[in-house]
Image: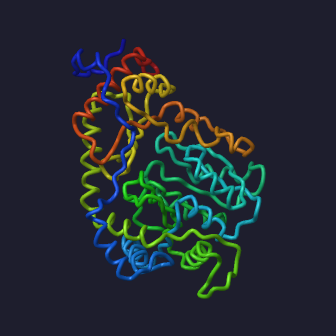
Amino acid sequence: MASYGVARSNDLLAKPCAPMPVARPELPTAEALLPYLRRLDETRWYSNFGPLLTEFEARLADRFGPQTHVVTCANATQGLTLCLQAMDLPQGSLCALPAYTFVATAHAVIAAGLVPYFLDVDPDTWMLQPQTVRDALQGAPGPISAAILVAPFGLMPDLAPWLALREETGLQVLLDAAAAFDDLQAAPVPAVVSLHATKVLGIGEGGFLATTDDILAQRVRQRTTYGFRGSRESHIPATNAKLSEYAGAVGLAALDGWPHNRLRWLRTAQAVRAALLHLPQVGFQPGWGANWVTSVCSVRLPDGAAAAVEEKLNARGVETRRWWGLGCHTNPAFAGCPHGDLTETDRLGASVIGLPFAIDLDFEQIGAVASALAESLDALGPPPPPEGS
């Protein structure tokens, strides 16, 4: 059997780990919320863009440039849907998106009246590339009106080539930045961020659009409020996707704690990286835990090894999760959607797993995961020799 140089005792390997969940979210404490809840008690303004939610949006906008507008919404899926609707795209046209993404991306496309067109991703960044979309314009089974790029698990793409694609082709471009709260610093491409409890900055349920396009921001806002535009008259078909003052309170408390919590995420991620240094067949996303933080630890294993490693880890009490499964296109909900060649997506789906990760994961837990993962990799047998050897 292959050995990856793991220093671990036989006693540690002989017994299973204490049950370890793959995620353990942490939202602001009751003490942190109390000042904002007292403000809510004083105003008795509980929804419809009261002072707490307005302040929360303003503080989010301050993270970006002075021309960036922020529109909060019930969740990021709604944010993607309403943004696509606000772009006035031809109904029934294709929306290009990566097959390697969470199902919410494709659900939003369908809810907006478009057809998902699944394309492959780059094997190193796990991202859809603008050139792939450009090439697909020629052979697509119908007109492509928009493209959604995804920041995989929080890793931000280079937006400059996407701006060039938009300028060159006229395609509308939208960024699904659900997990990229930390790394999203500007929004020249409209970006939708999730505020779900499982994200690094969570409020329970929620999301927001960040964009430099003030007209788009107004259109999305209108679609979150029954089509109202400064009156009680509904001007367009819309929905109710507002956040409440309670959500605003949680958001403000979360922002108060963000600088400290970001350091906690960094510290934990760096401890995980250090614990797995001796496992050369475990690959991290570029910059994970060093340049940017996120709330999950998705690692790439040897090709096709995910199922076998997961089985062994789970037997040891280490919970895992393939957050994006085998690729969005494999879900029955999207069985009839067109797609291109998905070789890299299929490879990633069979090789990427989520390991236990939380803001307060301690060294003992990290060590237990590292030992269990090393044992699981050893059981795979020796790695194949390098090409050309």
Name the side, left or right, on which 371 lies relative to 284: left
Res. 364 image quadrant: top left
Which residue appears at 26% of the width and 64% of the height?
31
- Residue 385, image x, y percentages: 42, 18
Residue farthest along the bottom direction in this orientation? 231
- Residue 80, image x, y percentages: 58, 61
Q: How is the image coloured?
A: rainbow
Q: Foreground: 40 or 204?
A: 40
Name the side, left or right, on which 113 lies relative to 149: right
Residue farthest along the top direction in this orientation? 1
- Picture layout, residue 154 above or below residue 39: above
Counting the numbered discs, the total is 0
Name the side, left or right, on which 134 lies relative to 20: right
**Quarter of the figure that contains the N terminus:** top left
- Residue 309, image x, y percentages: 43, 24
Residue 65 visible somewhere in the drawing:
no
Which residue appears at 32% of the width and 27% of the height?
279
Residue 140 visible somewhere in the drawing:
yes
Which residue appears at 74% of the width and 50% of the height?
140
- Picture layout, residue 346 above or below residue 305: below
Res. 338 image quadrant: top right
**Quarter of the figure that contains the C terminus:** top left
- Residue 380, image x, y percentages: 42, 17
Name the side, left or right, on which 215 lies relative to 2: right
Q: Foreground: 212 or 329?
A: 329
- Picture layout, residue 53 above or below residue 358: below
Which residue appears at 32% of the width and 52% of the height?
291
